[in-house]
Amino acid sequence: MTTTRRNNTLRAIIFASLLACATSAFAQSESAGVNQYFVNCASCHESDDPGHQAPKTAVLKKMTPERILEAITTGSMRTVAANISDADKRLIAEWVAGRKLD
């Protein structure tokens, strides 16, 4: 095997390894976000009770993660979300919006 071919093979292996790690980390983050959402938010946002005024998850999914994080840290949901850690608030915002915060 030539040096160039060996280097290209090594680069491909390293790239594949890094991609697998990044994908795994994102999947764990996404899983944690959905879990936090259903533990802390879904009882209102998925409720069919006419007394609940919370928008459905499908409506929230049209928002940016920045807007969702703002709502749960300093906005209308800050009191309800007061006992949720900052890290979990980020996970929730990212899962609902379907992308990482900038």
Image: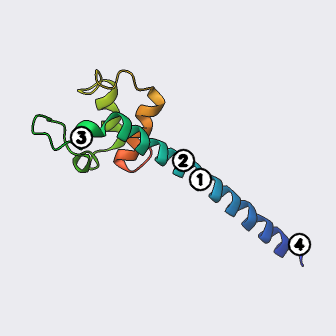
Viewed as shown, does residue 25 lie left or right of 73? right
Distance in Å between CA atoms under marks 2 and 3: 23 Å
Q: Are marks 1 and 2 in contact (CB under 8 Å)?
A: yes
- The earlier-in-sequence mark between 4 and 3 is 4
Disc 1 residue type (three-letter): Ser
**Could you tell me residue 17's position as x and y percent?**
70, 59
Quarter assignment of residue 49: top left
SS under mark 1: helix
Residue position for label 2: 28
- The earlier-in-sequence mark between 1 and 4 is 4
Could you say which disc has been placed on residue 45 in the image?
3
Disc 2 residue type (three-letter): Gln
Of the pair 92 and 15, the residue shown nearer to us: 92
Q: Residue at x 35, y 45 (%)?
A: 96
Of the pair 94 and 33, the residue shown nearer to us: 33
Disc 4 residue type (three-letter): Thr
Image quarter of the C terminus: top left
Residue position for label 1: 24
Quarter assignment of residue 85: top left
**Could you tell me residue 61's position as x and y percent?**
29, 49
- The earlier-in-sequence mark between 2 and 3 is 2
Distance in Å between CA atoms under marks 1 and 4: 31 Å
**Could you tell me residue 16's position as x and y percent?**
68, 63
Distance in Å between CA atoms under marks 1 and 3: 28 Å
For discs 1 and 3, the disc positioned in front in the rendered view:
3
SS under mark 2: helix
